[in-house]
Image (tube, rainbow, N blue to C red):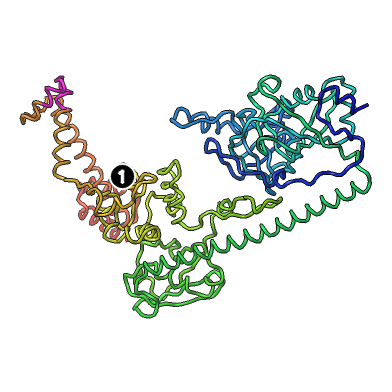
Amino acid sequence: EIRSALLVARARVDATLSVVRGYPPLPAQLQRLSTERFPEANEFVKHHMMALSTVEAAPFLGDLSRLEESDKIGLPFEFADELYGRAGRGQDLDLPLLFEVTSQVGRKVHCAIFDFVQGLPPSCVVLPSWVMADACIMDREPVRIRGVKLDLISFVKVQPHSVDFYHAVHGSGQEVNCLLTESLSRFSALTEDSSVPIEILGQQHWVQVVELQPQAAVRIIDCDVKHDFEFRVDFDPAPDLEDEATTKERQEELCKRGRERSEKHEAQRRAAEEQLAEIRRRHFESLRELFEDMAGNEDGASGEVEVALRLPNGTSMRGKFSEGASVAALKSIALRSEWAQVREPWGMQITMPYPRRIVQDTEFITKSMHRCTLTVQEEQQPEDLLSKVTLGPLDSGNTCNCMVAADTEAADLVEATKPDFQSSVVAFFRRLDRHGDGSVCREEVAHILRILDDRIWSEQHLDRVLAASGMTYGGQIFYEGFLDWLFAGSFLEPGSNMMALDKSGPALPTYSERTLRLQTKVAYEVQRFVQAGFEIDDAQRRVEAGEVLQDTVAEASKAQEQDTARAGTAAAEAREHQIQCIMGLSGIHRDAVLQVLQDAEWDTEAALNLIFDANLADE
């Protein structure tokens, strides 16, 4: 009877539907955990976003029932400008907005935007509860959100979870194609190996998406499923139609796949730990090499200043250094210690005991440090280091692989050749800015540039570039101004030739201080003529002819008032200095000192004599 109803509805069904048969083998491309990497859209990728269900988010966002009935995602309102503002910035905006949600174990689901939600924290996303349950995502679990481009659906093959689906179809009296098309029209996208609810006669019946065409994930949004294209539907039998042997075989297969996923996940975790250990090792070696270069010949073996270092593990070490040597020499010997070899610290700070302060890398070893014990404090690795580990396919099965992003500063700088090139480079230099004062050490920058290309970035070439920029002082580089100057030319754009900075390229700009002073003076005189009522062209001609505007009575009076005010301020400061000196020497209060100075006509020596004479008379 069920078969006849489906045939009348022109559904493609197996004529032996009622005969028990096993499941066909699942080809690798149907596995949701290894879906192909779909093209990225709108350069939108957000890591470690906290997933919230509609139930969890309802207390502070209100009624989310409409979102729960869909398969769409709610994003923070702050992301609206990032996406829709692309058109205003001259960038392409791929529509419709579709996203790929990836869980911690690699399960993926695709959906469209529901809305940019006011009041949703920037680190959170809202998903329907049934989508999170199907993707095995728990509340407050971190997920990755990536914008993707998906092709339009042309074919779907589904498998009901229960034989009740067939009874509901028969009871509805509808054709299967029409019923399924109407139910799928409320979804924005479909993903293979996912389950979706189909509503029939007011009840939900779950079906598994077994196969999709043309890709393993497709979009339905913004298309009229009923009329705009042919939508082919096919079925696999529900598990209720299996016999006991087939069910047992299916369960064993599922258990086997689960064990394989667990083993691969454990292998992924071990690989991640090994990769992170390799990152620390390479960073430690780079740091040690940097401080050895900065220390020069100071190896702690000889010198007139003896300094002790207390290491974080409780041990101590001593070294002798020359007066005037860089503090980097202290860090150099600390990084050669047994503690450093075992811990491989990400960084370190050296503190003085009294007065307690952090010794900066730009300081020098002085005699005041002789026989002092300085404390070495270990700096922890950055919190975002783990975010450099991303998940990707390991093979055609249901596995994930741990791919570690560039771990050194040089690789970070090379990675900055992405669309927002200058901002990425500025952000990189900001990470090197340990004190937050807008400057970085010249030696650090030189070391990074030598890693990139030691042939181009010689010491002489770097000196020429820094001198031309005018953004260095005392061994520090003011990186924001330096990068603004550097990016003002086209020789450092992504994809350009870095050799343009060499001697064979365009000459570096030079500045004449005398010319700049003259231009400033001319501009000042032109401004004075304009303020006096002259047209700007007339003012420029008068200044070029050597004419100087005489000071008006008001200007002269104002200048005299300013001179008088400055003189009064200087006199007041001098008298305040006299009062403070006498208070420090005599120990009497301010009012008494002020009275004595007035009596002595503000003669400091005479005022002190009056105070001492009064003290002797009292004795």
Q: Amino acid at mark 1?
A: Trp
Residue 213, by quadrant, is top right
Q: Which residue is mark 1?
A: 485
Which of these two is toward me, 342 or 172?
172
Judge the density around disc 1: few (<14), some (14-19), many (≥20) Cα neighbours within 10 Å. some
The magenta span reads: 527-540
**350 is higher (above) or lower (below) than 337:** above
Q: Position of residue 195 (x, y in %)?
A: 77, 37
Verify whether residue 382 appears in magenta.
no
**544 is higher (above) or lower (below) than 32:** above
For the point 14% across and 30% down, the residue is 525
For the point 68% across and 45% down, the residue is 103
Q: Quadrant of the N terminus?
A: top right
Q: Of helix, strand and loop, which mostly describes the magenta segment?
A: helix
Q: Is residue 596 left or right of residue 337?
A: left
Q: Position of residue 300 (x, y in %)?
A: 40, 77
Q: Position of residue 490 (x, y in %)?
A: 32, 42
For the point 59% across and 44% down, the residue is 47
